[in-house]
Amino acid sequence: MTVSKSFQRFMFLESCASETHEIHWPILNTKKIRGHLNPAGLGNAREFSEGSLGQTSVAFDTIEDYEHADATGTGYEGSAEYAIVRTPEAAQVTKKFAELHGGKGAVILPSGLSAISTVFETFLKGSKPTILIPDNRYFPAERALKHLNGINPHLGVYRYTPRASADEILKMVATISSDGRKVDMIYLEAPGSQTFEIPDLKRIIEFAKSRKILTVMDNTWASHVRFKPLAAGIDVVVEATTKYPGGYADTPSGIIVSASEENHRKISYTARVNGNGAVSPQTCNRLFNRVASTEERLNKHFASAQRAMTWFQAQPFTQDILCPANPRSPDNARFHTYFHKGNGLFTVRFKEAVTKQAVHDFVGRLNLFRVAESWGSHVSLVLPAHASRALETSPQPGERLRFSMGLENGDDLERDYSSASLALGY
Ligand SMILES: *Cc1c(COP(=O)(O)O)cnc(C)c1O
């Protein structure tokens, strides 16, 4: 008759001192606590991990169990055998994102940027790795590429215009291959950072597929709600879950979801070997619990943004509004093709006559809008939009402010920006 290990342990504990009891009683059954050595922790982590706020060691009952876990990199229920990377909480939240995107697997990282750089590190290998990026990319993504370039001087980074057609991409790929390079990755971000242009996604994806070029999309603007890149044929989707999915400025994290198991395995491996896959279980749990309300929150953010855009559009100090949801935007047709609804973001470009000081004074008079980086949380934010563009030959004049509408009452927000606008001198 085989005696279960936990029963064996139970019997042994009978004759142990109380301090030993205290330690082992909560972890009697190793499987039940998913290998956690300290499940006495707090809060809603309990659902996935019997209450730990993170673990390092993952416990097994036998060497055979451990060796199997070590060889396969798996502990309990999708988590890792050494749980700095892929804790049980991370396993749960990544499972959720893989489902939401219809992917074969997801990896969580400590920031959106670390998700992006992990993708670069995974796929930009070989003697002459080559990537195409949009000119309106999230700036730190390009900085990450510059850093990689220091490690591999043969890395080739080529820029395409923010509203690129498939034809433009095709021509670039042809020119690049005549230089003896193969394009490894077409990187997409749409709508792009700060200025929100949209390229011809559908045809670019079709073209990339026909050439077997990997497509990666930064889908932070849309979140999993407004656009599903994998369903549109993208290979790998990256999202800063720091933004809308977390929604309250307290979930620094990024997610990478792959359409294929093979790519997912490669990405998981990178995150495991470079140690960058370590995300606080508390963050994972917050994110897990917030994801369900993303769409509802986005709709409220968008309603406030629409109202504010309508207001700004009617003011004499406004030159134009950069937002694909704006009916006057050159990106509005593509916006309706891919995204349908917007979020809380838009950028106001003021008339040339509006001075920088006047814009600062306007912001100084705002009460509900904080000056801060990032976006997508419950609190309204505002920040000067300094878009650095390499392909833009004559940047348009006028001060620009990017707004991120929070979840405050719409009447309160309007009262705030309308009274502050007296500072603009019109
Ligand atoms: C914020 C952002 C990121 C990076 O997210 P972090 O979590 O802040 O590192 C990446 N892409 C886009 C488009 C973003 O707006």
Image: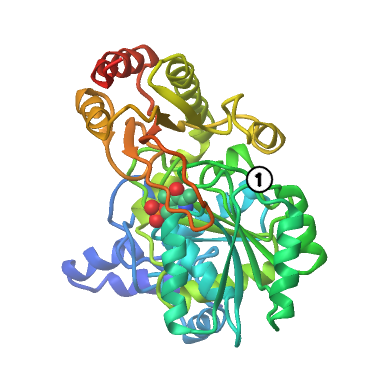
Quadrant location, the N terminus: bottom right
Residue drawn at (55%, 82%) of the image: 68
Helix, strand or loop under label 1: loop
The kind of residue tagged 1 is: Lys
Q: How many marks do you count on the picture? A: 1
Residue at 65% over, 35% down: 335
Query: Relative to the observer, which residue lies in front, 313 or 351?
Result: 351
Q: Is residue 118 left or right of residue 211?
A: left
**Residue for point 74% across, 64% down:** 171
Could you say where residue 252 lies in the image, as x and y percent from the top left?
Answer: 36, 52
- Image spot of residue 87 (x, y percent): 43, 63
- The front one of 33 and 86 is 86
Report whether 218 appears left or right of 173: left
- Write the residue at 50% across / 56% down: 255
Report if residue 4 is visible in the image.
no
Camera-side residue: 188 or 408?
188
Q: How many residues crowd mark 1 within 10 Å: few (<14), some (14–19), many (20+)? A: many
* Residue at the disc numbered 1: 228
Q: Is residue 332 visible?
A: yes
